[in-house]
Amino acid sequence: MTLGPRLHLGQRQTLVMTPQLQQAIKLLQLSQLELAGYVERELEANPLLSESPREDDGPAVEPSVEKVTPRESDAADTLADGAAALGDADDRWSGEYADHGGDGSSVRMTGMGGLGEDAPDAMARIADSDTSLQRHVLAQISAEMVDPVDRMIAVSLVELLEPSGYIGSEGGNVVTSLGVEPSRFEAVLARLRQLDPPGLFSRTLAECLAAQLADINRLDPAMQALLDNLDLLARRDLSGLLRRCGIDAEDLAAMIAEIRALDPKPGLRFDHEPVRTVIPDVHLRRVRHAELGEVWEVELNTDALPRVLADRRYYATLSRDARTKETREFIAERWQTANWLVKALDQRANTILKVAREIALQQEGFFRHGVSALRPLVLRDVAIATGLHESTVSRVTSNKFIATPRGLFELKYFFTSSVSAASGAPAVSAEAVRSRMRRMIDAERPDATLSDDRLVELLRDEGIEIARRTVAKYREAMRIPSSVQRRREKSLSGMGMAAQVAAL
């Protein structure tokens, strides 16, 4: 046997992630806003792509609809072929930019559905009108402080201002870095605490509340004693507060009511984040069919879908005028990319519709009767029913929303784990169990709050087998306090504060 290089021919099958496949997977998991931005960039980079104006679509593109009926009467294909929209794109690329001065500076709105041409400018003006916390404080500093050293100290403290309006322990570093006297630093800090809104530049919650009370002339010694013992108030130790403050029950009740009316984080009122408008990807409606009776109709939101066309006529014109090999290769590559994007968008719409239809079929009880009828559902169930991979279903349901008669929901909402039921009954959705727990807790009496053990018993009486630690986990996830804390809260709201303190 000799050793040496040899040639060996063989065949094997491998799965290769082509650029087109990667693009299709990427498009599948994008939200509407992300998809609009992606399509906008492709329109700018590819001269063979054009956007179909919605007012010119007419009845040529019918909305995609699927009816959710029993499986033996499943509706057939209802999504129109995206290739049918290709065709008459006569000089659309050049005409679009000619209408805007020919400088390529036009702004195209994709998937916004009837907002109008000047909607982006209007939204920008709304966002610019919001005043940030730092800008609000700096405007007051420029008007109140004249001395340049005081201004320098104040601006340095503004940089340390947290979104809540507090400053951390780093304030002492300003004294060292600026080389100012501690007395002057404290004087500037005291002036900053008098700015609007009261409570800014505080180090603790007690300081913040004291500043607000001082602004309305309500910071007397008894109130200061109450602020010094906020830990007792948090524990509802009313008898201890009476001893520390040296007041009667009626005065303590009034003081606690005043503190509850204050703002513990005054800086958050300037936290203006852009409001995210959620546009549904799919609509679910209940309609009456002449032959099938009452059915659930799943329809794509065509107003949110990008209208992208591959301009055949422009491609033919460019191909005919191409003179060099590099130009012809560029045009061919752009044409292939344009066609693939149109097909990928059509496939994305088909996949979303297919998955939404299966979810509506699986969770029909929820749409008819509410969250109590929500069934346990996992990605594998939908993947098997639709013939898709679990990862594909996961991508489809991320950041996709469905508008239903019961409200707007993310598709991920309908996937919940199961909780065992007694006596061999079907499993119950964890979301349905949480909803049932919340209703029980909301209906409890102040003098008979339900402990976790009692919730377990009540749920078992309804045929739901659940452990106490699971009940505690669900309760904490819903941010519901323990039974002891709820008893204190409900007793404070159910009877007068003065009467409760007097009862002690």
Image (cartoon, rainbow, N blue to C red):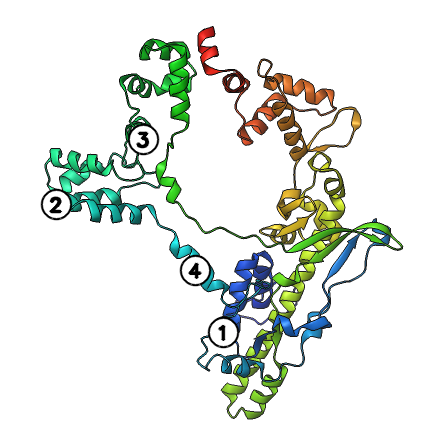
Tag 3, which secondary structure? helix
Query: Which numbered disc flags the more N-terminal residue, 2 or 3?
Result: 2
Label 4 to label 3: alpha-carbon separation: 34 Å
Front residue of 5/157: it is 157
Q: Position of residue 144 (x, y in %)?
A: 20, 44
Q: Position of residue 122 (x, y in %)?
A: 46, 61
Q: Is residue 4 visible?
A: no
Label 2 to label 1: alpha-carbon separation: 52 Å
Instruction: Tell me the mark number nearer the camera, choosing from 2 and 1.
Output: 2
In this rendering, is residue 391 above or below 103? Answer: above
Label 1 to label 3: alpha-carbon separation: 54 Å
Instruction: Tell me the mark number nearer the camera, choosing from 2 and 3.
Output: 3
Instruction: State if disc 3 and disc 4 touch (CB < 8 Å).
Output: no
Q: Which mark is residue 212?
A: 3
Quarter location, residue 340 = bottom right
Disc 2 designates what residue? 149
Instruction: State if disc 4 and disc 1 touch (CB < 8 Å).
Output: no
Tag 1, which secondary structure? helix
Label 1 to label 4: alpha-carbon separation: 22 Å
Query: Which numbered disc flags the more N-terminal residue, 1 or 4?
Result: 1
Query: Which numbered disc flags the more N-terminal residue, 2 or 1?
Result: 1
Q: Amino acid at mark 2?
A: Val
Which residue is drawn at the image coordinates 54% and 63% (left, top)?
Answer: 36
Q: Position of residue 346 (x, y in %)?
A: 66, 66
In this rendering, is residue 43 above or below 262? Answer: below
The residue positioned farthest toward the front in the image shown: 217
Which residue is drawn at the image coordinates 61% and 61% (left, top)?
Answer: 304
Quarter location, residue 219 = top left
Relative placement, left or right, of 95 versus 144 is: right
Disc 4 designates what residue? 124
Disc 1 designates what residue? 44
